[in-house]
Image (cartoon, rainbow, N blue to C red):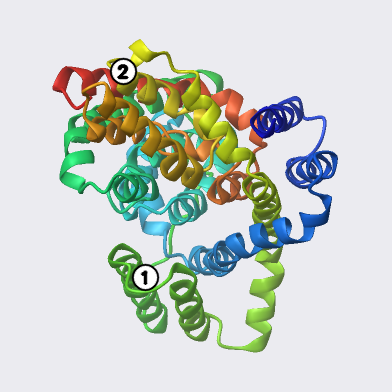
Amino acid sequence: MLAATGFVTIALFLVAVLSRRVSVLIALTALPVVVALLTGFGGQLGTLVGDGLVKVAPVAIMITFAVLYFSLMVDAGLFDPVVARVLRWARGDPLKITVGTAVLTLLVALDGDGASTFLITVSAMLPTYRRLGMRPLVLAGVICLGAGVMNMVPWGGPTARAMAALGLPAQDIFVPAIPAMAAGIVWVLVAAFLIGRAERKRLGVIELDDVVPVAEPRAGWERVRFWFNVVLTLALVAVLLAQLMKLEVAFVLAFVLAVIVNRPSWAQQQKLFADHGQNVVLVTTMIFAAGVFTGILTGTGMIAAMAQALVGVLPDGAGGALPVIVAVTGMPLSLVFTPDAYYFGVLPVLAQTTAAFGGSPAEIGTAAILGQMTTGFPLSPLTASTFILLGMSGVDLGEHQRFIFTWAFGTTLVMTAVALVTGAI
């Protein structure tokens, strides 16, 4: 009963979002509340919602200060040299701009954190897309592709969860997937080329001399402040990579230092909040709404029941094909399962099933990271970082999913094929 209710809830949510009949905010909050009331969990509603909100609170705090930090860095011109290099290479060509966006995303996403990747790349490239008249949908889609494949790194969420759930090291789960990941990166660049070619056909090559202002040379205090921002941002990324402290703490401290140096007066700080406060409210509101959704579905046991139901439908003779099934279905199932529910709930059972058929549990872990919350996470309404990407680029969730789903699924298919050839799965 719980599994059926969970699947119906997810289906109704996807229909509501994709049809644009209601906003994502209402779908994430009102729908699960109504389902909880109808299924007899009304008395526990306060606890369920509260648990969900508490779980996402650190993410919301981190994103609040991260959005403010990178907004301040953009205002201070930190990313101007990067954008200038991309523009200098692209020369107003939408195709080259799109490919440049993919390359930038692949580099930035090395930190393994989707939120930081979206904050940096959207902040850096959105002004360029607007100047050229390119669709923000293309920006969000290409960033989605690059961030998705790079989310396979061992310090990223999915692979770390897979290793923890199966008790296996990176050598068993991630290393065999490196050739497949390399193929996925090539696919992302090819996809960016094809998407960019369509934008070039729509817009043509635009002369940028009249569109992009010439950067003024920095001198004196401006130069010192610029290099302070560079060092501070690199230090922040290093802290994130080394996991020296919690993300929310790192961004709070970095933002305070950045404000003191770049916006020392109260009037300047007020203007910063006025200029960028709307983005913070939009993103954090969506994150807390997602907390309501996952809190209710997790607390009522619907997600766990769905996981068990999914495993139960596998026929006995599917053991040998299970790694391929896991790899191919992982990306679309990112729209249904949270990473915790899948990697800690479904994956161990799938691994045990494979072992019973004489297969390797490590292959299941490798197969899972080829799509489940890697290529699929920037499209999933169950991850907070998706709403950072959409909120900052101004793109609707349903429109984003329709535009980029096939390309993202193609990444998984390419990586699955290479994984099969190399014996990773």
Visible in this render: residue 135?
no
Q: Which residue is more in the foreground, 363 or 218?
A: 363
Relative image position of residue 69 (x, y in whole percent) = 51, 69
The 10 Å Cα crowd at callout 2, few under 14, some 14 to 19, many 20 or more, is many
Using the rendered view, name the quadrant where residue 283 is placed. bottom right
The residue tagged with tag 1: helix, strand or loop?
helix
Q: Is residue 346 left or right of residue 381?
A: left
Specify the label residue 236 is tagged with. Answer: 1
Going by the numbered disc 1, the residue's amino acid type is Leu
- On-image quarter of the C terminus: top left
The residue tagged with tag 2: helix, strand or loop?
loop
Q: Is residue 65 left or right of residue 156?
A: right
Using the rendered view, name the quadrant where residue 282 is placed. bottom right
Going by the numbered disc 2, the residue's amino acid type is Gly
User: Of the residues tagged 2 and 1, which is closer to the observer?
Assistant: 2
Relative image position of residue 336 (x, y in whole percent) = 57, 33
Q: Which residue is depicted at the point 46% across and 27% down? A: 205
- On-image quarter of the N terminus: top right
Position above or below: 358 against 38: above
Position above or below: 42 against 265: above
Position above or below: 405 against 141: above
Q: Which residue is depicted at the point 20% across and 48% down? A: 169
**Distance in Å between CA atoms under marks 2 and 1:** 45 Å
Relative image position of residue 10 (x, y in whole percent) = 67, 32
According to the image, label 2 marks what residue?
A: 319
Position above or below: 66 against 378: below
Using the rendered view, name the quadrant where residue 192 is placed. top left
Relative image position of residue 203 (x, y in whole percent) = 55, 24
Q: Which residue is more in the foreground, 23 or 399?
A: 23
